């Protein structure tokens, strides 16, 4: 079994607790794609092999059945096949893998899942613990191992201070201070890269693309928690967007452009004469796409060269004006907010301008993905605003960038907005939509992973249930 040194360190600690019935609870943070799922599958394989005669049950839960639980089952089956157990192990009930009298039960930790009644006497595993509800774990999963003082392992990556994984981690660190027994294991991307240089090269490219302070880089690779919310951009980030060439009024020969449109509301009149809040404007941001010099894998930079806004304009009048502007600039891609009242406008623009128009519907998930992409552009210094020209568009854009707020949710989505008391977010949204328009111009990066390390060596291994006196895997 090929495991890296840091994986073996965790496996040894887990097996020590299992062998001697210590019932320890471990927390394991490994950077994304660093091999925590392989580690889990190898521990399961080892325990199944050791206990196939006398029996025993491992329970593993994941935040969702599909795809996470299904992937975990498939991974264990692949490892069983790798080590000659194909045709010997059995699948039972659609969520259990058995080898002889030992089995692994795979369960979903979704709020509506029915899991009561299962017992774990070999091991209890909580995959992606940061995404598992604290109440679900405490009431339904943790009691599964109470009668057997089962060893428990929480795997995951950090998010914020409110997650189950963070709670277990902090408790473990406190216990370590008391008795010196290591219960928390943390391997960020640099720790993984020391044993896998190819992984390090990949993460360095992600750092260049996302920026070191990007929420996803901080949590998935650096294993640093984030705060629940605050400013979307720091002053330094806003400043990094300034100082580009002057604004353009017409396209330059040979340049490639993309455009993004946030659809605002139409003018409204209150029947009782009461004041009506001015609607968001329909805003257009047009950017040139500048390929990076040198490496073909370098990401392009977007220079915003023109902006326009219409406030309260009826959409029937708005469409021909938008179409005229876009025909002038001939952008290769036009992303249009097609949420709610934006849908018919996006449809009419697509009819006028063809397949270059791409409707974008805002949902919690799509807005979150857009926000993360927008931050990666800013952090990478790849989004530049035209030189200060005293225009209302430039002034409004800066105000919205400075006033924008971010909210980071427990489900790892983010929201971004300008509070109504601080104004509008129409220019902010059109800038964010540029990140979607520029996706086709980003080079594709191949992803991959290697496994390395030493083989388990044969020796006698004891578990709480059975002593094995024949060559088997050990750690």
Image: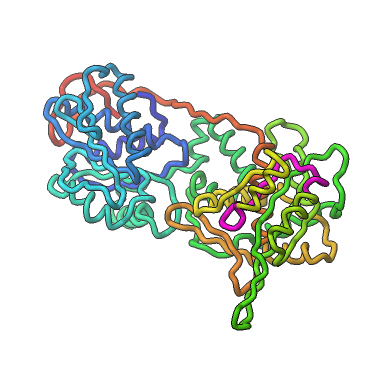
Which residue is pictured at 50% across the width and 50% down the height?
A: 365
**Relative height, residue 224 to residue 458 (above, below):** below
Side of 65 where 96 appears, left or right: left
- Judge from the rendering whether residue 39 lies leftward or rightward of residue 373; answer left or right: left
* Residue 142 appears anywhere in the view: yes
Q: Residue 198 appears at what percent x and percent y?
A: 55, 29
Q: Nearer the viewer, residue 36 or 437?
A: 437
Identify the residue at horizontal 80%, vertical 51% (top origin): 325
x and y, in percent, of residue 60 in the image: 27, 40
Q: Quadrant of the C terminus?
A: top left
Region in magenta: 326-343
In the rendered image, residue 109, in percent from the top left (x then y), is placed at 30, 47
- Asked whether residue 339 is drawn in magenta, I would say yes
Residue in the picture at 62% in, 38% down = 205
430 up-or-down from 456: above or below: below
Mark yes or no: residue 236 visible: no
């Amino acid at each position: 079994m090929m495991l890296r040194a840091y994986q073996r360190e965790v496996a040894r600690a887990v097996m020590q607790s299992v062998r001697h019935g210590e019932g320890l609870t471990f927390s394991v943070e490994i950077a994304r794609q660093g091999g925590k799922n392989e580690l889990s599958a190898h521990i399961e394989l080892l325990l199944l092999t050791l206990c196939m005669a006398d029996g025993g049950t491992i329970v593993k839960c994941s935040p969702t059945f599909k795809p996470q639980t299904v992937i975990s089952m498939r991974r264990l089956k692949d490892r069983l096949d790798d080590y000659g157990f194909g045709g010997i192990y059995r699948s039972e009930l659609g969520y259990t893998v058995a080898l002889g009298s030992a089995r692994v039960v795979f369960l979903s930790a979704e709020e509506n899942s029915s899991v009561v009644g299962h017992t774990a006497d070999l091991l209890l595993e909580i995959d992606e613990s940061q995404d598992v509800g604290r109440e679900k774990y405490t009431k339904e999963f943790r009691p599964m191992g109470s009668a057997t003082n089962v060893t428990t392992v929480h795997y995951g990556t950090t998010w914020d201070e409110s997650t189950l994984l963070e709670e277990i981690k902090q408790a473990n660190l406190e216990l370590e201070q008391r008795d010196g027994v290591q219960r928390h294991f943390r391997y960020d991307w640099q720790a993984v890269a020391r044993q896998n240089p190819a992984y390090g090269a990949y993460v360095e490219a992600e750092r260049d693309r996302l920026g070191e302070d990007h929420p996803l880089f901080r949590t998935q690779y650096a294993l640093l928690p984030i705060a629940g919310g605050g400013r979307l951009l720091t002053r330094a980030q806003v400043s990094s967007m300034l100082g580009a060439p002057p604004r353009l009024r017409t396209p330059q020969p040979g340049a490639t452009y993309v455009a993004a449109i946030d659809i605002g509301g139409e003018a409204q009149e209150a029947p009782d004469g009461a004041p009506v809040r001015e609607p968001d404007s329909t805003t257009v941001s047009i950017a040139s796409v500048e390929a990076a010099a040198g490496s073909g894998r370098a990401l392009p930079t977007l220079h915003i060269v023109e902006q326009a806004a219409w406030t309260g304009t009826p959409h029937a009048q708005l469409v021909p004006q938008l179409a005229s502007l876009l025909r002038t600039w001939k952008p290769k891609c036009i992303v249009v907010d097609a949420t709610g009242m934006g849908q018919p406008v996006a449809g009419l623009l697509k009819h006028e301008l063809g397949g270059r128009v791409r409707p974008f519907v805002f949902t919690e998930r799509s807005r979150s993905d857009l926000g993360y992409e927008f931050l990666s552009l800013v952090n990478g210094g790849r989004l530049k605003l035209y030189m200060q020209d005293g225009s209302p568009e430039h002034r409004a854009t800066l105000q919205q960038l400075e006033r924008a707020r971010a909210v980071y949710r427990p489900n790892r989505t983010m929201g971004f907005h300008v509070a109504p008391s601080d104004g509008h977010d129409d220019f902010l949204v059109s800038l964010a939509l540029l990140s979607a328009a520029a996706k086709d111009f980003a080079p594709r990066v191949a992803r991959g992973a290697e496994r390395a390390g030493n083989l388990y060596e044969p020796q006698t291994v004891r578990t709480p249930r059975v002593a094995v006196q024949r060559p088997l895997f050990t750690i």
